[in-house]
Amino acid sequence: MISNKRYTISSGIMAALLCATTLTAQTGVKVLTLPDCVDIAIQRSTAVLKGNNNVANAGAQVLAAYGQYLPNLAAAGGYNYDRGNNFYASTGPTLVNENRSQFNYQVTSSINIFTGYYNYSTWKAAKLNKDISSLTLDYAKQEIELDITQSYLQVILDKKIVSLDSNNLSTSMKREDQLTMLTEVGRKAKTDLYQQQAQTSSNKLLLINAMSKMQNDKIMLLEKLRIDSTDNYDIADIAIDDNPDAARYGNREVLVQEAVQNRVDLRAAKINTEISDWNIKKYRSGYLPQVSLSAGLYNNGAYFNTLEVNGATTPVETQQNIPTQLYKYTYGLVGVNATWNIFDRYYTKTNVAIAKIAADNARIDQQDTLTHITANVRLAHNDYRNAVQQMETVGVGLNAAQKAFDAVSGLYKEGATDFITESNAQLVLLQAAQDKIQASVNMMLRKKALDFYIGAIKP
């Protein structure tokens, strides 16, 4: 009777510890898969939101640069009213008192015929800058996918550790219950029971800590997704792909070459050098003449309400009315303008020199990016090889630990070994099982990291 009660109490404690994971299935919370998390992170990420704005801004700059090839069209008009005395003395003293309305309008247009390749270079650089903005956005999405995958797999690992610790605690609780009964009938020493109670308590602590870590890692994952509540969300379990896939990831130099071809940040660095070269051509246009074609329609007119010359009223009835003047007095003008700065106080020379320095720096950055990519791929491949070796080692270790535990457990039941030996075998088995699941998750993560470093992630 005592033993059944003790077993019931211990089972209740374990159930309480696992409550956080079992309640999620009962409350209808939203379950997030790995693709769901990646999509949410990409949609809500500040880097992606700003990246989309940068792409739109670059597109506007391309349109502005293209617009420099088109003719402009401007219209202007004016109206003035004046009244009063004017004294004219050029041909004789004349005093004119007038009440007059004046108006004018003009429509003008001009187009650049030749700008020394300034407009063409600006347009090419703007198009390339838009490409860089798009590539930078893609790279940000790839970084987000890798980061979210790592955080997601951490939660999955935590769940599996919790499951292992829970099973381990269940084993200790059952043994403690058995020892309680055997102690009462005198078949086992109380020291074994006390030691088992201490181990059960330690196993409970392991489970409590594991569940706390799982909850914290879940909170951090949801924070990256910009989700506030952890109560209404759960993380879906996934199959751990721990196959080394040596045919895909085994050859390091092949992966390096693939990275050189696929990495979007390297492509962006190459495009940046092209932009620098076009900027040099743009500023060199200052050495060349600029030619433009302009045309316009102009009109000036006036209508006298009253007019007095030297005190005598002059008739104004014969003047043409305003509608007639609006078209009759219109005249057109077409012209070709050429400008060539013979000496511009070294303005062009200075700009060209600065652009050349910027181009040189861009090539240095491109080389640094290439070196950085190559090093990262090799480091990631070393981590991958280490993960492969870990998988081989932990598989053997788990198999041996399971056999050892089964053998020691059988001997302990027969009284052929002591409690310490069985307890150690149980701890070794738990550690081996945790090592195995950690190695499996790490193997999956190492392959995902390699996909990122070789540019194989397609957001």
Image (cartoon, rainbow, N blue to C red):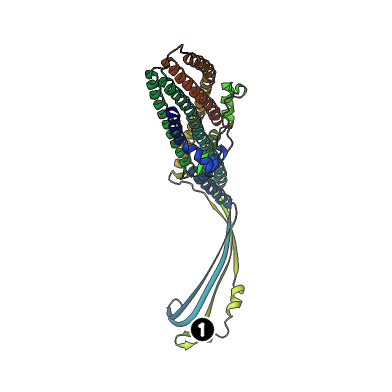
Q: Could you tell me which quadrant the N terminus lies in?
A: top left
Q: Quadrant of residue 38?
A: top right
Query: Circle 1 sits on which residue?
Result: 305
Q: Is residue 6 visible?
A: yes
Above or below residue 7? Residue 40 is below
Helix, strand or loop under label 1: strand
Q: Residue furthest top?
A: 416
The crowding category of the residue bearing disc 1, from other C-alpha atoms within 10 Å (few below 14, some 14 to 19, many at least 20), is: few
In the image, 54 versus 11, the foreground residue is: 11
In the image, 183 versus 151, the foreground residue is: 183
The kind of residue on which mark 1 rests is: Asn
Can you give x and y, in whole percent of width and height, for residue 147 in the image? Answer: 50, 35
Above or below residue 336? Residue 280 is above
Can you give x and y, in whole percent of width and height, for residue 354 in the image? Answer: 45, 39
Q: Could you tell me which quadrant the C terminus lies in?
A: top right
Picture mark count = 1
In the image, 91 versus 104, the foreground residue is: 104
- Residue drawn 58% across and 21% down? 250
In the image, 53 versus 294, the foreground residue is: 53
Can you give x and y, in whole percent of width and height, for residue 455 in the image? Answer: 57, 32
Can you give x and y, in whole percent of width and height, for residue 80 in the image? Answer: 48, 75
Above or below residue 28? Residue 104 is below
Left or right placement of residue 183 versus residue 278 in this view: left
Q: Is residue 284 visible?
A: no
Left or right placement of residue 367 versus residue 191 in this view: right
Q: Residue furthest bottom?
A: 312
